[in-house]
Amino acid sequence: MATTTFFYTLLAIILLSLTSVSNACPPSDRAALLAVRAALKEPYLGIFNSWKGYDCCHNWYGVSCDPETHRVADINLRGESEDPIFQKAHRTGYMTGFISPAICKLERLSSLTIADWKGISGPIPPCIAYLPFLRVLDLIGNKLTGEIPTDIGQLSRLTVLNVADNQLSGTIPRSLTNLSSLMHLDIRGNRISGTLPINFGKLRMLSRALLSRNKLNGLIPYTISYIYRLSDLDLSLNQFSGPIPASLGKMAVLATLNLDGNQMSGPIPPTLINSSISILNLSRNAIEGYIPDVFGPRSYFTAIDLSYNKLRGRIPKSISSATYIGHLDVSHNHLCGRIPAGSPFDHLEASSFVYNDCLCGKPLRAC
Ligand SMILES: *[C@@H]1O[C@H](CO)[C@@H](O)[C@H](O)[C@H]1NC(C)=O
Ligand SMILES: *[C@@H]1O[C@H](CO)[C@@H](O)[C@H](O)[C@H]1NC(C)=O
Ligand SMILES: *[C@@H]1O[C@H](CO)[C@@H](O)[C@H](O)[C@H]1NC(C)=O
C-alpha cells in the first residue's frame, strides 16, 4: 500500500516537472532576452532582478509567452506604472542604454512595449520590421534617435505604432502606408521632417493619426479623407502649408481636427463647420477670408479655435443656430461688426473676441 502511494507520488512529481519543462521558454528566446537586458541599465527599481533562471516564461517581469507555442509573445516594460515595484520605490522608472537588435530573435513577438523610461537612446533596431507577428510597437517617452525603420511597412499585422516623445528624425518611410492593419499612429514630439506620403489614405484601418510637434511640411494630402474610421487627426505644430482640404469636413467620424501652429492658408472650407467635427483648432496659421455662414444643427463644437489668423468680415449670424459651442476663440484676427447673441454665446468671455479690428457688442463694448 505504502509502496503504491509512493509510486504514484513519484509519478506525479515526474509528470509535473515534465510539464513545467515543456512550458519553459526555448533557450534561444531566453538568450535573446538576456542580450536585451545586457544593453539596458535600470538602476532604481530592479525590474530585471526577476530575469533569472531557465524559464523566462514564468515570473520574468514584463515577459509573457504564448500558452501554446511557449515562445515569448509580449514584452511589456513601462516606466510609469501602478505596479507595486514602483510604489515601493516611490518613483517612476528611469533606464539608460539601448534596444538591442537581439530583440529581433524573438520571432514570435506580438507586442513590444518599452515605454516612458526617459533615458533609453540609440536607434529603433531596423530588424524590428521583420518580426512577422508584431501587432503593437510602443516605444513612447524615451530618447531614441535615428529614423523610423525604412521597412516598417512589412509589419502587416501592426495595429499600434507609438514612438511619440523621442528624438527621431528623418522622414516618414514610404513603406508606412503599407501598414494595412494600423489603427493607431502616434509620432508626436519628434524631429520628423519631409512631407506626408500622398497615398496616406491607404491606411484604411486608421482611427487616430497623431503627428503633432514635428517638422513635417508640404500639403495635407486629400487622400486622408478616404480613411473612413479616422476620428482623431492631429497635425498641429508642424510646417504644413497650402489650403485645408474641404474633404476633411465630409468624413464620417472625424471628431478632432487639430491643424494649429502651421502655415495653412486660404479660407476655412464650409464643410468643416457643418460636420462631425467637435474639436476644431485652426489657431496660428495664415487662414483668410470669412468664417463660413453655414452653422446649423449639425454644428456641435466642444472647442473651436480660429485665433491668430487673418479672418475678416463678421461673425456669421448662423452661429447662433449651432447646437452647442463650448469654447470659442476668434481673437487676433481682423473681424468686425456685432457679435451675435444666442444660447451658444451667452457664456463666452471677452477674451474669445479681443484683438480684432472692430468687433462690438456683448461681451465686448456696446456697438
Ligand atoms: C508596399 O506593398 C506592395 C505590395 O506588397 C509592394 O509592392 C510595395 O513595394 C510596398 N511598398 C513599399 C514602399 O515598401
Ligand atoms: C489651439 O492651438 C493653440 C496653438 O497650438 C493652443 O495654444 C490652444 O490652446 C489650442 N486651443 C484649444 C481650444 O485647445
Ligand atoms: C450641412 O450638411 C448636411 C449633410 O451633409 C447638408 O444636407 C446640409 O445642406 C448642410 N447645411 C449647410 C447649411 O451647409
Image: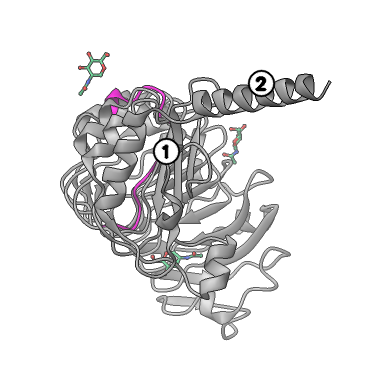
Q: Is residue 23 left or right of residue 340?
A: left
Where is residue 82 shown, x and y percent of the image? 59, 62
Where is residue 151 shown, x and y percent of the image? 21, 29
Q: Which mark is residue 46?
A: none
The quarter of the picture showing ligand 3:
top right
Q: Amino acid at mark 1?
A: Tyr
Residue 341 in view, yes or no: yes
User: Residue 283: which quarter of the image?
Assistant: bottom left
Residue where numbered disc 2 is placed: 11
Q: Secondary structure at mark 2?
A: helix
Q: Amino acid at mark 2?
A: Leu
Residue at image x 59%, y 63%?
84
Classify 10 Å Cα crowding around label 2: few (below 14), some (14-19), many (20 and above): few
Residue interval drawn in magenta:
153-166
Residue 214 in view, yes or no: no
Viewer-proximal residue among 119 and 259: 119
Viewer-proximal residue among 134 and 293: 134
Residue where numbered disc 1 is placed: 54
